Image: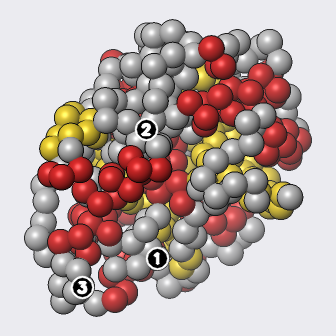
Amino acid sequence: MMSDASRIAAIPVYIVAAGSVSAWGHGREAVADGLRAGVSRLVREDFGPAGQFHVGRSGVERRDDEDRTRTLLRAAFGQLAPTVEKLRAVPQDRRAATGASSKGAFEWLSRHPDGGGLPMADLTPDAPCRWLARDWPSAGPVTARVAACSTALHNLFAAADYVSQGIVDTALTGSTDASLVQLYLASFLRLGALSRDGCFPYDARHAGFAAGEGAAVFILANEKTIEGEDLDPLARIVAWRTSADSWHTTSLRSDGRQVTLLVERLLADAGLQPSDIDLVSTHGTGTAQGDSAEAEALRSIFADRTPPVFSVKGAVGHLMGASGGIEVAACIECLSHGIVPATAGFETLAHDCQRISVHRRSLRRPVRRILKWTLGFGGHLSACILERP
């Protein structure tokens, strides 16, 4: 069973600012440099009784007075200050804010099981949208969509909906996740999804994902606002679509059929053919089952003309609810600088991932359109097409 929702912008929607923190570092330049390098930034850490794991640590200084999701989001949002200042004249009721984490203040509660004196509103997965709405600030729509590892894209699409429908002129959207916690890692290890020794998407060595932490934030705007405030758009969101299926709580169908249908409908929404896509940013977790299903979907969508495919998770780890955010940040740099990225750690295609194009080294090549998808536990699927403006 499958249900879906789609949007193609009635009013064109552009990303005009991007900020992020991850194992690549802080900001757009760090993301671009990480993509060009194409190497893993994972480090081995000890998590007590749970043992040692390779993880993607952001380098953001730890604070003892707040959950790490808020610290990470604050670091990413701070990078948007120049654009926020330019948009000061936009009335607050013409601004929206969307955002969430996938699980709330898990890191804080692991240190303070009694709540540690923080208000309940700061502990829930929807807390980031309130932080963003206040700091932005927004008196327009404020929305939080929690959708497991698809959280970031669901919130990006909510923001795009508000702009494309003319409800607001500009919107701030963000996602954040801090999953480098002993109990969390141990639970995924028990589930059989986590690797202790790195992450190798689509590679013959793929045996699970590596966890990472980070945050990503974006400002969206319509053309009128871009022209009025003299902004330089980074990317246009051509079309977006979400889908839900009931196949399994934690896995995809082995034939990738839900992903195939999602992308076929998305392309139809945008009036595009598979050949119009220059690059695909996949979910690419490095689990054998997930990689195989995505490879099957890629073959079904593109036949024998699969464009270059990349996953950032071998480089920075799986950021869970923020994973789609750092991946959109990567897509923006690919469009801006003409980067066809390597997938860090990739050497040889796994047997069940044949006939897809994954690179060992990053290339310089013009990129006009990117297909981006994320796939969350519980059947939360999301995909969009990003275009160089």
> In the image, what residue occupies the spot 51% across and 43% down?
328
Mark 2 nearby-residue class (10 Å; few <14, some 14–19, many ≥20): many
> In the image, what residue occupies the spot 29% across and 60% down?
183
Q: Pick whichever of labels 1 and 2 is earlier in the sequence.
A: 1
Q: Percent from the top left, x then y, of residue 171?
A: 54, 66
- The image shows residue 55, relative to residue 222, as above or below, that is above
Q: Pick whichever of labels 1 and 3 is earlier in the sequence.
A: 3
Question: Which of label 1 and label 3 is nearer to you?
Answer: 3
Q: Is residue 298 left or right of residue 37?
A: right
SS under mark 3:
loop
Task: Please state which of residues 127 and 364 is positioned toward the viewer in this rendering.
Answer: 127
Residue at numbered disc 3: 115
> In the image, what residue occupies the spot 71% across and 70% down?
166
- The image shows residue 58, relative to residue 286, as above or below, that is below
Q: Amino acid type of disc 2?
A: Phe
Residue at numbered disc 2: 209
- The image shows residue 379, relative to residue 92, as above or below, that is above
Please indicate, yes or no, whether residue 297 appears anywhere in the rendered image. yes
* Mark 3 vs mark 2, CA separation in Å: 30 Å
Residue at numbered disc 1: 126
Task: Please state which of residues 321 and 253 is positioned toward the viewer in this rendering.
Answer: 253
SS under mark 1:
loop
> In the image, what residue occupies the spot 60% across and 53% down?
250
Q: Pick whichever of labels 3 and 2 is earlier in the sequence.
A: 3
Q: Is residue 118 left or right of residue 15?
A: left
Q: Percent from the top left, x then y, of residue 289?
A: 61, 34
On residue 194, the disc is none
